[in-house]
Image: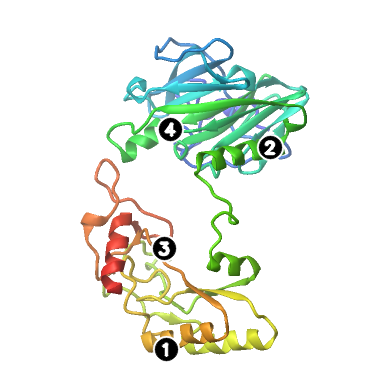
């Protein structure tokens, strides 16, 4: 558990809201992992609450309230907050909505924190907080903070006694951090909307901030109730359809099949510099020779062996089949990797899978782009608002989806 002294030794520009160690980025740009439940040694940060002013915007209602804290940059790593209590709009018997129009979000704000009064607690209260990643904690700490970005599902919850409240972030779902803090035994659970991150990609905010809050009671007031409520919301809106509802012959087969991924037919090594650092971006002519792991002919023998062992239903995911091997030279996928056997051998592999009654699918990277690709063009690279290229996972640049679609159609024809 971090002590007050340890925290005070970290620079925070005189502001109690944000305190960071050397090398950290303000407002936890890198997700912080930890648990207030069982890993006290990993509890991060301590927060204090102040009201430094008021920000007016439209939000009407009668029943429940939230505190809205708008953070502004202050110094190299500090944040100055302005806070106001706002009433929520009632949308149902046990539902309320918060809306902050994008026109009312300050253009220089670093973040907007929406803190519901009904999702606060005191140490020792019967209950827990829960984040959609599967993380939860009891109200059993005096001090601490848990925060995480990249929400797998845009919901989080707090249970106290017999009632449970859950929040459903409707807009900005990929641009907020889930946060739970404890200060002097007082807990707050809320969403921190990252205005600074949005401005990295957009010159203007792209939508209102909207959060729906729902109260569950009785047998529904647990994590199963939250899961059911979120599932029903997705189904009712048409955003999600069950497998049964959209069953195709391919999905029907897959429900009963064993899935095997060929990892990989072939792949390119990532060059390293003299000091052992992997080279991020290399151009055509700078690649090392492709390494073959499981050529197409060997894959035929592998599938036959599985069939001979009694496996009747198998779904093969073929990875590393494209030009340059795995992740080779996308967004261009063709010609088929010559080192793994070339197009004729690949066609025989697909025909073999069909003959055995197996399903055969291709692994393809549809949003990556490498400078070594014969299709390389700076115009199709996703960029930050300042024009800098956006780097994706696996050390490529991220390509516009339309370029992947159009180039694949062109090549297939």
Q: Residue at x 28, y 48 (%)?
A: 383
- The residue at which mark 2 appears reads as 136
In the image, is 277 to the left or to the right of 293? left
Q: Quadrant of residue 153?
A: top right
- The residue at which mark 3 appears reads as 277
Label 3 environment density (alpha carbons within 10 Å; few <14, some 14–19, many ≥20): few
Q: Quadrant of residue 184?
A: top right
Q: Can the viewer see residue 185 in this picture?
A: no
What's the distance in space between the residues labelled 4 and 1, CA to CA? 50 Å
Instruction: Please tell me whether residue 239 is drawn above or below residue 94 in the rendered image.
Output: below
What's the distance in space between the residues labelled 2 and 3, CA to CA? 38 Å
Instruction: Please tell me whether residue 47 is drawn above or below residue 314 in the rendered image.
Output: above
Nearer the observer: mark 3 or 1; the answer is 1
The earlier-in-sequence mark between 2 and 1 is 2
Query: Which residue occupies the foreground of this view, 217 or 187?
Result: 217
What's the distance in space between the residues labelled 2 and 1, CA to CA? 51 Å
Q: Which mark is residue 194?
A: 4
Nearer the observer: mark 2 or 1; the answer is 1
The earlier-in-sequence mark between 3 and 4 is 4
The earlier-in-sequence mark between 2 and 3 is 2
- The residue at which mark 1 appears reads as 345
Q: Residue at x 35, y 25 (%)?
A: 102
Label 4 environment density (alpha carbons within 10 Å; few <14, some 14–19, many ≥20): many
Q: Position of residue 402 (x, y in %)?
A: 29, 56
């Amino acid at each position: 558990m971090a002590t007050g002294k340890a925290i005070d030794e970290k620079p925070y520009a005189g502001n109690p809201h944000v305190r960071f160690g050397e090398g950290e980025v303000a407002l936890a740009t890198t997700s912080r992992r930890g648990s207030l439940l069982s890993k006290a040694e990993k509890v991060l940060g301590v927060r204090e609450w102040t009201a430094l002013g008021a920000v007016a915007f439209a939000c009407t209602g009668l029943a429940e309230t939230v505190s809205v804290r708008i953070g502004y940059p202050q110094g190299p790593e500090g944040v100055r907050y302005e806070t106001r209590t706002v009433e929520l709009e009632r949308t149902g018997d046990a539902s309320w909505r918060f809306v902050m129009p994008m026109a009312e979000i300050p253009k220089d704000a670093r973040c907007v924190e929406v803190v519901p009064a009904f999702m606060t607690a005191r140490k020792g209260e019967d209950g827990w907080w829960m984040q959609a990643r599967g993380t939860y904690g009891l109200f059993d700490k005096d001090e601490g903070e848990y925060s995480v970005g990249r929400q797998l599902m845009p919901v989080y919850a707090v249970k106290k006694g017999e009632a449970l409240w859950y929040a459903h972030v409707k807009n900005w779902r990929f641009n907020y951090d889930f946060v739970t803090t404890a200060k002097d035994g007082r807990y707050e659970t809320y969403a921190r909307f990252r205005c600074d991150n949005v401005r990295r990609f957009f010159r203007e905010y792209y939508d209102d901030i909207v959060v729906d809050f729902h109260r569950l009671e009785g047998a529904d007031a647990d994590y199963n109730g939250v899961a059911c409520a979120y599932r029903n919301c997705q189904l009712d809106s048409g955003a999600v359809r069950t497998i049964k509802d959209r069953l195709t012959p391919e999905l029907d087969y897959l429900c009963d099949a064993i899935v095997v991924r060929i990892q990989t037919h072939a792949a390119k090594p990532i060059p390293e510099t003299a000091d052992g650092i992997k080279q991020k971006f290399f151009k055509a002519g700078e690649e090392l020779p492709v390494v073959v792991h499981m050529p197409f002919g060997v894959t035929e023998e592998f599938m036959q062996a599985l069939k001979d062992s009694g496996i009747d239903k198998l779904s093969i995911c073929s990875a590393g089949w494209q030009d340059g091997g795995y992740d080779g030279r996308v967004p261009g996928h063709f010609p088929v990797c010559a080192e793994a056997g070339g197009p004729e051998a690949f066609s025989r592999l697909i025909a073999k899978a069909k003959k055995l009654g197996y399903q055969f699918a291709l692994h393809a990277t549809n949003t990556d782009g490498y400078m070594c690709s014969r299709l390389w063009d700076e115009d199709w690279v996703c960029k930050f608002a300042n024009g800098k290229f956006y780097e994706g996972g696996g050390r490529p640049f991220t390509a516009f989806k339309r370029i992947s679609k159009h180039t694949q159609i062109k090549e297939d024809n």
